[in-house]
Structures are given as structure tokens and as C-alpha cells.
Amino acid sequence: MKDQTKKTLLLAGAALGTILALRARARRKQEFSFTDRTVLITGGSRGLGLVLARMFAEQGAKIAICSRTQHQLDAAREELEAGGATVLAFNCDVSDQGQVKAMIREITDRLGPVEVLINNAGIIAAGPLEEMTVEDFKAAMDIHYYGSLYTMLEVIPEMKARGEGRIVNIASVGGKVSVPHLVPYSGSKFALVGMSEGFRSELIKDGVYVTTINPGLMRTGSARNAFVKGQNEKEYTAFALMDANPLISLAADKAARDIINACRYGKSEVTLGLNAKFISMLHGLFPGTTSDLMGLVNMFLPGPGGVGQEAVRGYESETELTQSPLNAPNQKAAQENNEL
């Protein structure tokens, strides 16, 4: 009996060792160098997008970024060029398919075909459901879902022809668990997650690896540029102080490193941050429970009123708390990442 047990354990150990060796070999085979690669980062002029652009540039990539805000584009391009990067910057609305086609055509002409695509462009409006309009839902879908679709449709044919490519879709933990006061955002991120997973399953046979990233809260400084509705000052204060809290939010540099690593090895899906991983796992096991928990959270959030359905920026909604040391990490990140 002991001999049989020993034999079983040895076989199990050998099988496990073989599996680990095969996984390590596959990982090495999938490893993707970014040196001299053309990388397009939508929403790359500020926040997480700019942090990613810096890191890709450090690894020798040729960078293309786009944004709808010209002064931030100019500042980002100047910074990246000062660091020695080859950079193209485009004023492009990714929700406009014609603009996307023109941008990618010019990138291909000037830098070569896009070999790495990072769909990072985003929009967020925080407020109670009573203050959200159909236009808020459409705007979120246009940027997060259709904007990502348009860029992917343009770069995939070249990637398939070469037999390799990397696409990263920056979704959100809000695309795994719907978050109160962010319903248009969450709905569009759910759609992006579904599309991203489907594209991966159909493109992996062609050597094109699509990665879905689901970040939790991050200290990128972007809260000040978010739209807030209803009781805007209370909404912004809650949003900003959660973002600023290092116990529940992730440093932008750490998030960017994890994203680049996931891209390099063609990982399927990565959730960033312990809190985000926990709530995603909990929702996967007990979806009804987490939905009810979110209902309890909603009871403590500001109700309708204030500016109503008007959308104002976070920086237009400052309070004593958001200008206090409690929000210092956000203020520092905003200055570092071109969010001012």
C-alpha cells in the first residue's frame, strides 16, 4: 500500500513538473519584445495612458498617442520626445470611425503598422441614476465599446497577416461588478469585457493575443477630470478620496507595469488590485449577494439634486476635503501625469 501511494505521488509530481515546464516554455514562446515596435495608446496624453506611453518608450517602442484635448497632447508629446522617444500625437475622437481610420493610416505610413494596440481612452460620469440621461449611456458606449471596436478592426488585418500582434483593452472592475453611481460607465465596461474576451478566443489561432485588463481604483490623478452630476461636490469628494487612499487604490506605475507584463506574455485577463480581485471573485461565486451589497453601498451615496443632470468636472467641484492632505496623493499624481 505504501509503495502504491509512493508511486502515485511520484507520478503526480512528474505530471505537475511536466505541466509547469510546458507552461514555462509556452510563456517564453509567447514573450513579445517591444523594441522598435509601433505602439498605439488611445487616451495616451494623460493619466494611465501617459504612464504606459512612458514605459513603452523606455523599452524602445515607437509611440503613437491620441486624445481629444490638444494642450494635453502637446505636453505629452513634448515630454516623451524630450526623453528620446519617437512619438506621433493625434487629436482624434475614437468614437468617430472615420477619424480612427485616418489616424491609423497615417501611423502606418509614418511608423509602420500598429503592432501593439492599447485601448485606454475613457470617459466617466459619477452620479445617481436619477441624474443620468440616455446621452450619458451612449457617450460611454461610444468611447469604451465602439472606440475600442474601431481601432481593433483597423489593426487586426495587418496583425493576422504578420501572424503576431498584441491588443490590450483597458476595461474595469466595474465591467465585472456593476458599481452604483457609475451605471453608464459600468454598463459600457461590461460590454467591452465581453467583446474583448470574444476577440481573444477568435484571434489567438492567428497569433494575435487580446488581453482584458480590469483595474480597480488607481492613483492616476484622473479623478479631477471626471464628470460628476447631482450633488457634484459630494460626488467628487467621495470619488477623489477613495482614489487617493493607498489602502484601496493602486499606484499608477504599478498598474502600468502589470499591464505591460500582461501584454508582453499575451495573458488573457488580469484584474488589478487586491480589492478588485476580491470583489470580482465574490461576484463570480455569489452574484446576487454582491448586487445586494452594492445596493447597501448606494444608500450611503449622495442623492439627486445639486447641479442635477448637468455634467461638471471634478476640478469644478473642489471642497475643503479634496484640497486637504487627504487628497494629496491624487494632487501629486495629477501633476505628474498631465491631468492639470
Image: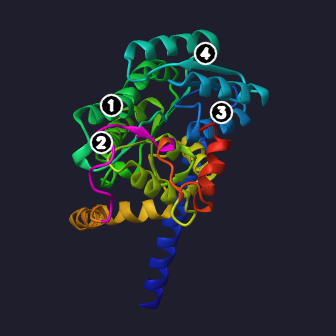
- Frontmost of labels 4 and 2 is 2
- Frontmost of labels 3 and 1 is 1
- State the residue position of label 3: 34
Indicate the quadrant where residue 115 lies. Answer: top right
- State the residue position of label 4: 112
Q: Earlier in the sequence, mark 3 or mark 1?
A: 3
Using the image, determine if residue 69 lies above or below residue 202: above
Name the residue nearer the viewer: 287 or 142.
142
Query: Residue 188: horizontal and vertical position, in percent?
Result: 31, 39
Q: Start and end of the magenta stretch?
A: 300-315
Total numbered badges shown on the rendered structure: 4
Q: Are there few (<14), some (14-19), or many (20+) residues within 10 Å of tag 3?
A: many
Residue type, numbered disc 4: Gly
Indicate the quadrant where residue 135 lies. Answer: top left
Q: CA distance from mark 3 to mark 1?
A: 33 Å
Q: Secondary structure at mark 2?
A: helix
Q: Badges 3 and 2: C-beta atoms under 8 Å apart?
A: no
Q: Earlier in the sequence, mark 2 or mark 1?
A: 1
| Quadrant for the C terminus in the image | top right
- State the residue position of label 1: 139
- Frontmost of labels 4 and 1 is 1
Using the image, determine if residue 218 lies above or below residue 187: below
Q: Is residue 273 magenta?
A: no
Q: Secondary structure at mark 1?
A: helix
Residue type, numbered disc 2: Pro
Name the residue nearer the viewer: 121 or 41.
121
Q: Is residue 29 left or right of residue 287?
A: right
Q: Earlier in the sequence, mark 3 or mark 4?
A: 3
Q: Badges 2 and 1: C-beta atoms under 8 Å apart?
A: yes
Q: Are there few (<14), some (14-19), or many (20+) residues within 10 Å of tag 4?
A: some
- State the residue position of label 2: 184
